[in-house]
Amino acid sequence: KNGVVIVGTGQGGFQLAASLRQEGFQDAITMIGDEPGLPYQRPPLSKTYLKEGRVEAIQLRPESYYERNGIRLISPERAIRIDRAAKTVETLTGGSIGYDHLVLATGARNVIPPIPGLEACNVHQLRTAADADNLRSALVSTRNAIVIGGGFIGLEFAAVAASSGHRVTVVEAAPRLMSRAISPDMSEAFRIFHGELGTNLYLGCSVAEVLRGDTGRAHGVRLSDGRTIEGDLILLAAGIRPNTELAEVAGLAVSNGIVVDAGLVSQDPDISSLGDCAAFHDLERNCQLRLESVQAATDHARTIARRLTGKAAQYDALPWFWSDQANWKLQIAGLGHDADDDVAITRPDGRKLVFRFKVGKLLAVETVNAAGEHMAARQLLRYPGGVTAEALAARDFDISGLAK
Ligand code: FAD
């Protein structure tokens, strides 16, 4: 038996291998990953790992774990083609690996917008541990950092760079920070917070060009309104795109991700997909959805592991997310992107919460430095039938007791 082959040794790929063994899966497990080293967590790359660079601290498990659990790790190696009829995966170095079930856990890569000058050597990205290592050493000899993109990763980097004495400028094309993921009220709270950290924010403007000198190094950017900003390090953090090429070439449906059903199975019953690269059928909202979070990747993996060990399994976990920016921990329970009403609350001790509603029903809760309320919100959002704005207003939006 060929067992399960997993392409991608990131968060979701690792979790799938681990969960398969936990669920009692007996056959072979093979993981193919194009990054060197053992599977690791990405979130610390823009947080502690960017500061400290301790590889052991981000590795998901030590090497012995894979040996002990019979998980074969092939890396660095790239899967380049799937032969669905023969049920094999071809690799860049000429290997051919047979599977009974294949899981595409290929993640995503950074969007490269058409901005002239991005090829300059001091323009950085932050997706892999190698990127974080480059960025850490570049920060040592630079003073002014410019971040293209005011999303989670750009702002987490900005907070680290500002705290280590760098002058930081963030340029965001949307009129507010993290606009795809959080409420206007929470964006505004973070705008003020980053301003207090000393970061310059340019909102609602885009970078038209990276300015380069004779040496080819970037020394700043020109904005679309003609203004220029000086900087000796540039981070491109303008969003990601799912890695779907393997699926496309294999003739599987792709639409903003590899199309899978609520059980994470693609059009081919022998191929599943998970995490950042998967557009899954969301049971709650009855639509295809793609999430970019550790929670989604790990819960997808658990779902697939249960299915592959003969248990009925569909992905119906509540999405949640976090982002650490300096001493602010933002936590989001639920998905609020199509909210039509928000209630923003500041507790007497300064903690901020935003409750997001659609037609009077609670969709999501955003909190800062309020872990208890975040956990309570996760329970609340699981209430059968949902929770109304009226019911929450009646208890003054005090949900902390509900966590018990
Ligand atoms: P990944 O973990 O990206 O793994 C995919 C792997 O597949 C990669 O190693 C890739 O190189 C490999 N691969 C791709 N194609 C091939 C191929 N053809 N052959 C072999 N290997 C291949 N999420 C949160 O919830 N909270 C956070 O605070 C947070 N912070 C983040 C900070 C940073 C800097 C980054 C980059 C991400 C952060 N995320 C955070 C997002 C989170 O890390 C991802 O959502 C998660 O890693 C997705 O897991 P995945 O398994 O789908 O993909």
Image (cartoon, grey):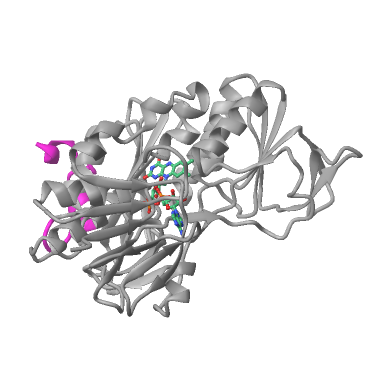
Residue situated in front as seen by the camera: 211 or 375: 211
Compared across the picture, whether 173 is left or right of 121 comes to: left
Compared across the picture, whether 228 is left or right of 282 comes to: right
Compared across the picture, whether 204 is left or right of 181 comes to: right
**The N terminus sits in image quarter:** bottom left
Report if residue 212 lies within the magenta region.
no
Residue 232: image location, x then y, percent = 76, 32
Residue sitting at x 52%, y 44%: 127
Q: Is residue 320 visible?
A: no
Direction right: furthest residue: 214
Q: Is residue 129 above or below residue 245?
A: above
Residue 301: image location, x then y, percent = 25, 55
The boundaries of the magenta stretch are: 383-404
Residue 41: image location, x then y, percent = 38, 39
Residue 60: image location, x then y, percent = 31, 36
**The C terminus sits in image quarter:** top left
Q: Is residue 183 visible?
A: yes
Q: Is residue 404 above or below residue 360?
A: above
Residue situated in front as seen by the camera: 311 or 289: 311
